[in-house]
Image (cartoon, coloured by chain):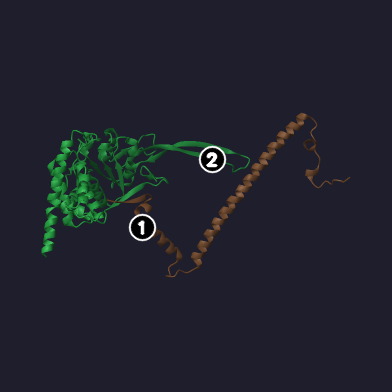
Chain colours: A green, B brown
């Protein structure tokens, strides 16, 4: 069990991040990683910004893994306060001394002091870990104020009542990587200009077709040509704009992984595969009584897309096989 | 009647001794002596408890010392299979444990996360 980056036995808990065996590193991912590492090496914190499903968190962890330092992962939250980042007073340390060195003399002392517990930011600054602050704009801006000093003056200022070392000099190996959604997303706050100004912001968009196919094939163990059909289907749906929530690479992975587990071929003639596609893609439109006509049109479009990407190709392949 | 012989200074009757050993005559004397004796009893019980605790602690410490003694004797007496002294082996095994994870050596716990 861990409490805010500190295990119950008192030692801080850090993450050791490493890629999955089927992690895909295409040239575009490699290029992005190298650019990011160059900024980090120069001492600048990185901020990956982009819509959901663009691989911000995975890229942040991948970059952190290249730094070969333990990682402190924090996920932004509306309820976050500064103390959730730096730590606070939790409980009391109680001390009682009974001295009977001379048996007829009883010396009795009792005192209690408040116990300070470092949280993840403090531990990362003190030990030189890599901080990955995921979706940091989900925390209220004032909770992140403490980061200003850490990123600029390399000094973490703790409450004076906390402990003797109220100022923590940031370890030279400390690096920070932030991720966030653009501001129009639900449940996010604006970034303070002062914090934004200290970050090197890299905008991420959806991956290119080749990367999406490679990731889908690797994570689902489908052959690349079958993964390509699913990716093309989702990408075409994304390009149509007929949705409320953008279909991302996650939709490709879900369709591909379920199909692979059920031993389904991505074929428009398989009603089970079509059902999976409709389940996962139709839900990208809001479900209201007014949108009924729109949903009917969207279903028609999805069926034609499935037929286009997974119908003719399969037929053609089967025809080629018959001819052979 | 048994004749009591005086063996030392302790047995010489004194005014104070006669007072303290004699049966209290009045209620006030009895109450005073009762209070004194209860205090004395509590003191002796504390003393006894302390001695028992001390005995237990000493026995524990003795056991630890004996175990450590046996270990050190083993290192000194038994030659290692590869010719190197046992203490070197022990140090090597400790170092090998430390290399298991940087965290262990540095005093933090590490959890592996695959992305």
| Residue A62 or residue A34, whichever sits in front | A62
Label 1: chain? B
For image coordinates 59% across by 42% down, the residue present is A100
* Apparent side of residue A46 relative to residue B98 in the rendered image (left or right): left
Question: Label 2 belongs to which residue?
Answer: A97
Q: Mark 2 falls on what kind of element?
A: strand
| Residue A167 falls left or right of residue B67 | left
Camera-near label (1 vs 2) is 1
**Residue B21, image x, y percentages:** 79, 38
Q: Which residue is at a point 19% across and 39% down the rendered structure image?
A: A285
- Give the residue drawn at x 54%, y 56%: B64
Q: Tell me: A105 left or right of A222.
A: right
Q: What residue did someone put label 1 on? A: B99
Residue located at (78% from left, 44% from top): B10
Question: On the picture, is A241 further left or further right than B93?
Answer: left
Q: Are marks 1 and 2 on the same chain?
A: no
- Residue A319 horizontal/vertical position (percent): 11, 60
Residue A114, x across and y down, in percent: 43, 36
| Quadrant of the drawing holding the N terminus of chain B | top right
Q: Quarter-wise, where is residue A200 in the image?
A: top left
Near-viewer residue (A37 or A305) = A305
Question: Residues under labels 1 and 2: Cα distance?
Answer: 39 Å
């Amino acid at each position: 069990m861990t409490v805010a980056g500190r295990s119950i036995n008192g030692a801080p808990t850090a993450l050791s991040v490493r890629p999955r065996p089927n992690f895909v590193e295409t040239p575009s991912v490699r290029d992005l990683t190298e650019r990011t590492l160059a900024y980090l090496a120069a001492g600048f914190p990185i901020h990956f910004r982009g819509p959901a499903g663009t691989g911000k968190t995975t890229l942040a962890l991948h970059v952190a893994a290249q730094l070969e330092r333990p990682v402190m992962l924090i996920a932004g939250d509306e309820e976050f306060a500064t103390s959730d980042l730096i730590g606070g007073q939790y409980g009391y340390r109680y001390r009682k001394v009974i001295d009977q060195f001379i048996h007829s003399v009883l010396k009795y002392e009792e005192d209690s002091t408040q116990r300070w517990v470092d949280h993840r930011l403090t531990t990362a600054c003190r030990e030189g870990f890599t901080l990955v602050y995921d979706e940091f704009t989900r925390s209220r801006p004032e909770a992140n104020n403490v980061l200003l000093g850490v990123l600029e003056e390399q000094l973490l200022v703790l409450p004076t009542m906390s402990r003797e070392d109220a100022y923590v000099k940031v370890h030279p190996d400390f690096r920070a990587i932030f991720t966030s959604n653009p501001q129009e997303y639900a449940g996010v706050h604006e970034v303070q200009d002062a914090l934004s100004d200290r970050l090197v912001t890299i905008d991420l968009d959806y991956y290119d077709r080749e990367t999406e196919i490679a990731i889908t094939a690797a994570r689902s163990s489908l052959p690349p040509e079958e993964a390509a059909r699913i990716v093309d289907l989702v990408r075409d749906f994304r390009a149509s704009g007929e949705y409320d929530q953008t279909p991302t690479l996650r939709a490709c992975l879900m369709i591909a992984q379920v199909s692979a587990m059920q031993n389904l071929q991505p074929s428009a003639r398989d009603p089970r595969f079509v059902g999976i596609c409709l389940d996962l893609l139709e839900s990208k439109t809001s479900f209201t009584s007014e949108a009924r006509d729109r949903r009917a049109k969207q279903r028609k479009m999805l069926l034609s897309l499935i037929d286009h990407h997974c119908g003719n190709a399969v037929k053609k392949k089967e025809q080629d096989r018959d001819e052979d | 009647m048994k004749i009591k012989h005086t063996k030392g200074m302790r047995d010489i009757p004194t005014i104070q001794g006669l007072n303290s050993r004699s049966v209290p005559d009045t209620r006030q004397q009895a109450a005073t002596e009762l209070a004194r004796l209860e205090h004395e009893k509590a003191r002796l019980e504390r003393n006894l408890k302390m001695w028992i605790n001390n005995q237990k602690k000493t026995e524990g410490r003795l056991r630890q010392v004996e175990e450590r003694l046996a270990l050190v004797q083993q290192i000194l007496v038994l030659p290692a299979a590869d010719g190197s002294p046992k203490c070197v082996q022990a140090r090597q095994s400790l170092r090998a444990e430390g290399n298991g994870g940087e965290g262990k050596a540095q005093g933090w716990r590490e959890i592996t996360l695959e992305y």
